[in-house]
């Protein structure tokens, strides 16, 4: 007597259903996510020396170094102090826009911390200074 061995069949229908549900959730949730956008300036048509001469100097300068340390007006500050110090600067210079000098080796999280602190302090804009 010969036994007929049946190979086990794998039912992929539940797996495909789960994938479709996840895909549908991503389609519905993606437009609801808040994304920060930075508008970049147009490429300068002038020479570099002329651009450097026209650059505004703000009384509020924030430097993020490569070791992610934050310096406000040439003094090292802790991230927890940044909001209160920026509020004081906002009271002293209400029309000024802070300038952020971000080192390219600095982490994005440090930039986000500075941006959030500036928003909490009442600043509506933040100049990001990029060096070539």
Image: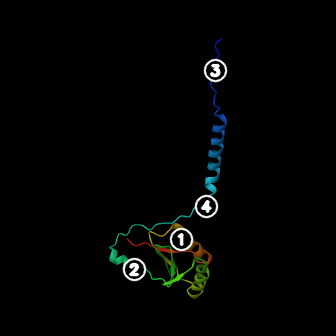
- Label 3 and label 1: CA atoms lie apart by 63 Å
Residue designated by label 1? 110
Residue designated by label 4? 34
Q: Are marks 3 and 1 in contact (CB under 8 Å)?
A: no
Which residue in the rendered view is the most extreme toward the front?
A: 1
Q: Residue at x 64, y 22 (%)?
A: 6
- Label 3 and label 4: CA atoms lie apart by 56 Å
**Which of the two discs, 3 and 1, sits closer to the camera?**
3
Labels 4 and 2: the sequence-earlier one: 4
Labels 3 and 4: the sequence-earlier one: 3
Dot 3 surroundings within 10 Å: few (below 14), some, or many (20 or more)? few
Quadrant for the N terminus in the image: top right
- Label 1 and label 4: CA atoms lie apart by 19 Å
The answer to whether 38 is drawn above or below residue 21 in the figure is below
**Which of the two discs, 3 and 4, sits closer to the camera?**
3
Helix, strand or loop at label 2? It is: helix
Front-lying residue, 66 or 61: 66
Helix, strand or loop at label 4? It is: loop
Residue 101 shows which numbered tag? none
- Label 4 and label 2: CA atoms lie apart by 34 Å
Q: Are marks 2 and 3 in contact (CB under 8 Å)?
A: no
- Label 2 and label 3: CA atoms lie apart by 84 Å
Measured as percent of width and height from the top left, residue 127 is found at 49, 75
Residue designated by label 3? 5
Which residue in the rendered view is the most extreme toward the top?
A: 1
Residue designated by label 2? 54
**Which of the two discs, 4 and 2, sits closer to the camera?**
4
């Amino acid at each position: 007597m010969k036994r007929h061995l049946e190979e086990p069949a794998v039912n992929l229908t539940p797996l495909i259903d789960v994938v479709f549900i996840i895909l549908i959730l991503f389609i519905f949730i993606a437009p609801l996510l808040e994304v920060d956008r930075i508008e970049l300036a147009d490429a300068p048509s002038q020479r570099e020396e002329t651009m450097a001469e026209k650059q505004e100097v703000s009384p509020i300068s924030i430097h993020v170094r490569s070791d992610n340390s934050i310096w406000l007006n040439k003094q090292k500050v802790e991230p927890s102090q940044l909001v209160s110090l920026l509020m004081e600067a906002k009271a002293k210079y209400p029309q000024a826009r802070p300038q952020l000098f971000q080192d390219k080796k600095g982490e994005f999280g440090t930039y986000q911390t500075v941006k959030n602190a500036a928003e909490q302090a009442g600043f509506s804009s933040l100049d990001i200074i990029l060096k070539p």
